[in-house]
Image (tube, rainbow, N blue to C red):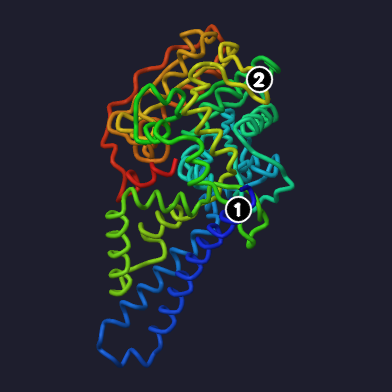
Amino acid sequence: MTTYKGLRGIISYDAMETIRNTNEWMGASARALSSYPAFALMPNPLFKLMSAWGRVTERSFARMVIKPDWEIPPVVSEDGQDHVVYIEPVIERPFGDLVHFRVARRAPQARKVLLVAPMSGHYATLLRTTVTSLLPDCEVYVTDWHNARDIPVSCGKFDVDDYTQYLVDFIRHLGPDTNVIAVCQPAPLALAATALLAEEDPKAQPRSLILIGGPIDPDAAATEVTDFGNRITMGELDYLMIQQVGFKYRGAGRMVYPGLAQLSSFIAMNAETHAKAFLDKIFAEARGQGSEGDKHNTFYDEYLAVMDMTAEFYLSTVERIFKEREIARNCFTVNGKPVDLGKITDVAVMTVEGANDDISAPGQCVAALALCTGVPESRKTQHLEPGAGHYGIFAGKSWRLNIRPLVLDFIDEQLQPTGQRKRRRSGPVPVDCGVTNFSEQDAKIAV
């Protein structure tokens, strides 16, 4: 039975890659064939449409196996100088690195921030705009998770226990003046890592912990995500979702939840929107109105770039975080060691939620405050952003105009001596929280 399942997984994985590769080749062939100068003598617009279809198709299917670049712009200082940003690994591990965005010719900033990126189908570059917005005021570090298909089986497993231990090691390395910002999926595990440090190495605890749109208690507010987790059994999930990496990649033989399978689910949830977006792009290309850096390419270059997750991480996340609610019930363990969230006493905790978030609905993330029984109420705070969806609370207009200033204020408060700390002021008057084009309703699915 195991042999059959493994063979079926390899065939399915390689079949998906074959389909992707074939579509990329068809796009390249159509682009090349219809671009011959001789066809310019024919007035039929079919050739321009075919060339446009080929360009869009080739680019789209090629992006699915390419990790996006960070492409962080230079930071402009007060004197008008541009400071180039260098991306430097600080800790390198098989399943993920701790990277530092070093701003050249600039003194280290007082605000040290560790952005914990989600491992949920897309690369850490999904937080590109978040990083860019924080760099002028902070020293920024990010967890850069690796694609499971490129990690040899000899590197072993990677589940929620290993993920949590990675966070413990990263935070300990950065030191107690670190402010951790966990975006969506890693929020419960960042909370567990902080509690583990509080018990094992109190001096290494972060200064503050900001949880943004994370499923601390998935049952606090029902969404399609939590409903799916409750409806499907772990056996069904294993059989339907898990496949074995094919022969093309270094991780051949590793059991994963494939990125291409995730992408097909993402697209199916908004099929009409995606179809219209691609048709509009093809016609724009045919009219000569397309460009390399237009909104379509900017969005889809990131959206289509997906990564595989290890099977054990995906399945343990669904089972332990969503089904068993181990974090919400404060019965989480790491490698058999109980983690007591009540042990957190010296870390300021902030939660951020979006009123229109249908991935981690309001109520799921703020549940962390009640679980942190050892943290004084004066060091807890929450923010509910009116009109914001999932994507907007960490990378959209709501983040830039409303949430980011509140987060920086919260971090600054922790820099003050205990007796001089002041309660946070109320958030600014809400503004239009819409996000350009269709990025809000689509990108939120990815996290």
Asked whether 115 or 416 is in front, the reply is 115
Relative height, residue 260 to residue 434 (above, below)? below
Pointer 2 residue: 197
Q: Residue, x 34% and y 90% (percent of image)? A: 39
Which quadrant of the structure image shows residue 382? top left
Q: Residue furthest right?
A: 154
Number of other residues with Cα within 10 Å of mark 2, as a class: few under 14, some 14 to 19, many 20 or more? many
Does any portion of residue 80 appear in the rendered image?
no
Q: Residue, x 39% and y 33% (percent of image)? A: 231
Q: Classify residue 191 as left or right of residue 99.
A: left
Relative height, residue 160 to residue 200 (above, below)? below
Q: Residue, x 39% and y 90% (percent of image)? A: 37
Which amino acid lies under the numbered mark 2 shown in the image of this protein? Leu
Q: Disc 1 and disc 2: Cα gap in Å?
A: 43 Å
Q: For the residues carrying marks 1 and 2, which lies nearer the camera in this image?
A: 1
Q: Position of residue 383 (x, y in %)?
A: 37, 23
Q: Position of residue 98 (x, y in %)?
A: 65, 39
Pointer 1 residue: 4
Does any portion of residue 381 appear in the rendered image?
yes
Relative height, residue 72 to residue 399 (above, below)? below
Which mark is drawn over residue 47?
A: none
Which amino acid lies under the numbered mark 1 shown in the image of this protein? Tyr
Q: Quadrant of the C terminus?
A: top left
Relative height, residue 211 to residue 313 (above, below)? above
